[in-house]
Amino acid sequence: MVPAQAHAMSVADSRRLTGSSLLLDAPGAILDIHIDDAIRDQAIAAWRVAAKRLLDLVGWPGQRLAARTFAGGVSLALTAPPDALYAATDLNEAAWARAWAETDDAAAHGVWLAETLGL
């Protein structure tokens, strides 16, 4: 059960980017999130930390991160090797799970992935 103080969040889409896009000039992955504007900046900052850590852990240092905000949401993107775009979408989703766990009450939202991975 989600407590009353919990913030609204939903993942709208997660997909790979096979080339240049609005946010990136290289292949990568993008995650579209609907989130309360009040906690959006905090969540983006947490995602950046988690994504950088995961990128380093999988041996992809130096990849670029990008975020584009819009009313009620954010698009979170990262570059990745072209032959690993499906894995990049999983990595982006895992980074978001960790960020959301830090931003809101993880137990209330069932976000167990970050703890399972030991992030």
Image: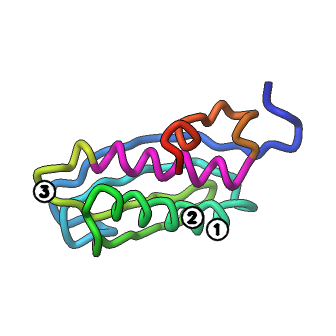
User: Disc 2, disc 1: CB below 8 Å?
Assistant: yes
Q: Please tell me which residue lies in front, 56 or 91.
A: 56
Among numbered discs 3 and 2, the one appearing first in the sequence = 2
* Spatial CA span between label 3 and label 2: 24 Å
Residue under numbered circle 1: 41
Q: Disc 2 marks which residue?
A: 44
Which residues are the magenta region? Answer: 88-104
Circles 3 and 2, Cβ within 8 Å, touching? The answer is: no
Q: Amino acid at mark 2?
A: Ile
Position of 33 compared to 90: left or right?
A: right
- Residue on which the image places disc 3: 82
Which amino acid is tagged 3? Pro
Which residue is located at x 64 percent, y 43 percent?
9
Q: CA distance from mark 2 to mark 1?
A: 5 Å
Residue at the spot x=64%, y=68% of the render?
41
Left-right relation of 90 to 100: left
Q: Does the stretch in magenta take in 110? A: no
